[in-house]
Image (cartoon, rainbow, N blue to C red):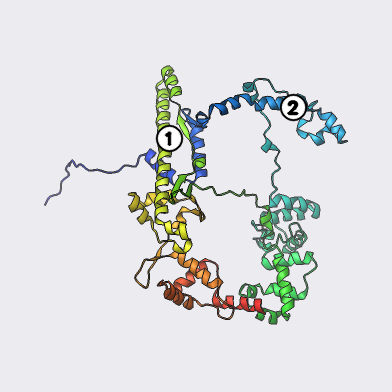
């Protein structure tokens, strides 16, 4: 049969992901912090978008009080009664620059605070922000550089010390070998070692150590507690990690009382001295969904409105500008802004409804957990929830990513409720993997010192008491995932506690 090119007309249906649809999908998996940053960027870019402040819902009494209370005028009146900067400095017997460094060159506080009467004029000034006067936390490198400038006098040695600071990790440990640093700087390794020995006494104690043993030794040396016996103990930290304390006592020639005293001293030391200068702010977890018990005993699910950005489309401004726009490029930009604003408001509302829908189904599936506790957590998969709410599994996965649910049992990530199932030996309902982990921890916490449970014994108890068909390897995997040592190590720990 001869082959020849030809044209065919075919009709088919396909789903095309437009840029706006792809953006809507991405909005589902954003956390509330990422969503707020995204909305702020859109507010800056799109002149037709404005944030809803909720002022329309205020009562008439609240609006009247808001008119009566004038914070700006109160600040101006208070500032007018302040003394001059010179008189305040004289009362402290010091210079004006020491009391008000930002007021240097000004006659008085009242003059620096004599703002114009109109609020609009005051808003145009660069008013001082209280955040500008909050002292910044020094980094570990800055803290050590100040000490090195006092400890090391020779310029060459100071350059080596600066390079040592640059090679510290977040724990304060030196991660580069001295020989390599000497090769980079063209110095002798002995010189680098000598500088390292000088700076190892810097605060916090233990920085510039090359390993854990040296870090603890530096701190003990400063306390004058680095005797030969505890130095031998630092060499065998691996035996402490394996809880072979009886063997360790024989190796270093210490009695039980001496060993316990030395271990107590080690616990009082800081194995990561550089972590004290970690300037990363701690972010509090804010729930996206609240679950409460209703008056009738049912569960009430509510989306946290505090973390949902509220934006409105200013159609009045659009109509006003559209009447005066003649340029084709400007009209195109204005229409694009209107379409984007409409899409964003619709997508935010759809995102909130989807989160609420998924959370409602999770609560419905895990009613026993919310009522009785973790032992009753049911196995649940994304497919189960997706089929119940008639959505795709990928959509449920995006909705539950980086979202938290506040329940009477505590604050949980939505992903926490999705666990695999373990078969029941009696043919009943499957058991949740998280519930099995909880039961394993309960058995280990309650085991007596003279009868430590092995993984095989735990598997037999789970099968006998609760009908959970679980293998020894699965028990070992769950135990290691909870950072619980093996039965051999636990037996050593309990023997030392009883001795």
Q: Earlier in the sequence, mark 2 or mark 1?
A: 2
Which residue is the site of mark 2? 79
The x and y percentages for residue 240 are 65, 73
Mark 1 neighbour class, 10 Å CA radius: few under 14, some 14 to 19, many 20 or more: some
Question: Can you say whether 32 is above or below 379 in the image?
Answer: above
Q: CA distance from mark 2 to mark 1?
A: 43 Å
Residue 336 image-quadrant placement = top left
- Please tell me which residue is depicted at 78% across the width and 69% down the height of the picture: 225
Q: Nearer the viewer, residue 423 or 266?
A: 423
Marks 1 and 2: in contact by CB < 8 Å? Answer: no
Name the residue at the front extreme: 296
Q: Nearer the viewer, residue 369 or 86?
A: 369
Q: Nearer the viewer, residue 130 or 465?
A: 465
The x and y percentages for residue 91 are 87, 33
Q: Nearer the viewer, residue 223 or 75?
A: 75
Residue 491 image-quadrant placement = bottom right
Side (left or right) of 176 relative to 158: left
Mark 1: which secondary structure? helix
Which residue is the site of mark 1? 345
Residue 108 image-quadrant placement = top right
- Please tell me which residue is depicted at 72% across the width and 61% down the height of the picture: 206
The x and y percentages for residue 296 are 43, 49
The mark closer to the camera, 2 or 1, is 2
């Amino acid at each position: 049969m001869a082959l020849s090119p030809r044209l065919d007309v075919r009709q088919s249906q396909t789903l095309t992901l437009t840029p706006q649809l792809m953006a809507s999908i991405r909005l589902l998996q954003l956390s509330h912090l990422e969503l707020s940053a995204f909305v702020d960027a859109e507010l800056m870019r799109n002149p037709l978008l404005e944030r809803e402040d909720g002022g329309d819902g205020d009562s008439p009494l609240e609006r009247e009080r808001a008119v009566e209370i004038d914070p700006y005028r109160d600040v101006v009146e208070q500032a007018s009664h302040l003394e001059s900067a010179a008189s305040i400095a004289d009362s402290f017997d010091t210079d004006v620059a020491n009391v008000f460094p930002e007021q240097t060159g000004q006659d008085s506080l009242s003059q620096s605070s004599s703002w114009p009467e109109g609020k609009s004029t005051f808003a145009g000034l660069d008013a001082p922000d209280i955040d500008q006067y909050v002292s910044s936390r020094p980094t570990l490198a800055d803290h050590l550089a100040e000490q090195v400038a006092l400890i090391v006098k020779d310029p060459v040695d100071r350059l080596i010390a600066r390079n040592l600071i640059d090679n510290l990790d977040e724990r304060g440990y030196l991660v580069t070998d001295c020989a390599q640093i000497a090769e980079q700087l063209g110095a002798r390794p002995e010189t680098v070692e000598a500088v390292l020995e000088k700076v190892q006494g810097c605060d916090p104690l233990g920085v510039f150590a090359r390993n854990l043993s040296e870090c603890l030794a530096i701190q003990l040396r400063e306390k004058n507690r680095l005797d030969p016996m505890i130095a031998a103990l630092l060499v065998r930290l691996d035996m402490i990690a394996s809880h072979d304390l009886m063997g360790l006592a024989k190796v270093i020639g210490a009695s039980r009382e001496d060993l316990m005293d030395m271990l107590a001293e080690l616990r009082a030391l800081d194995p990561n001295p550089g972590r004290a200068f970690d300037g990363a702010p701690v972010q509090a977890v804010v729930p996206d969904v609240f679950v409460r018990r209703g008056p009738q005993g049912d569960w009430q699910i509510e989306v946290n409105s505090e973390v949902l950005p509220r934006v409105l489309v200013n159609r009045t401004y659009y109509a006003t500008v559209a009447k005066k726009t003649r340029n084709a490029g400007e009209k195109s930009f204005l229409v694009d802004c209107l379409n984007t604003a409409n899409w964003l408001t619709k997508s935010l509302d759809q995102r909130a409804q989807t989160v609420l829908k998924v959370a409602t189904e999770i609560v419905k599936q895990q009613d026993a957990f919310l009522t009785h506790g973790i032992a009753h957590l049911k196995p649940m998969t994304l497919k189960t929830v997706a089929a119940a709410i008639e959505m795709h599994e990928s959509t449920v996965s995006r909705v539950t990513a980086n979202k938290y649910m506040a329940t009477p049992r505590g604050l949980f990530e939505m992903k926490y409720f999705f666990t695999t199932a373990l078969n029941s030996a009696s043919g009943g309902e499957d058991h949740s993997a998280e519930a099995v982990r909880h039961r394993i921890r309960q058995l280990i916490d309650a085991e007596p010192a003279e009868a430590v449970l092995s993984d095989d014994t735990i598997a037999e108890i789970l099968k006998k008491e609760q009908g959970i068909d679980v293998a020894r390897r699965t028990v070992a995997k769950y135990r290691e995932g909870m950072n619980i040592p093996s039965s051999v190590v636990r037996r050593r720990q309990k023997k030392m506690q009883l001795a």
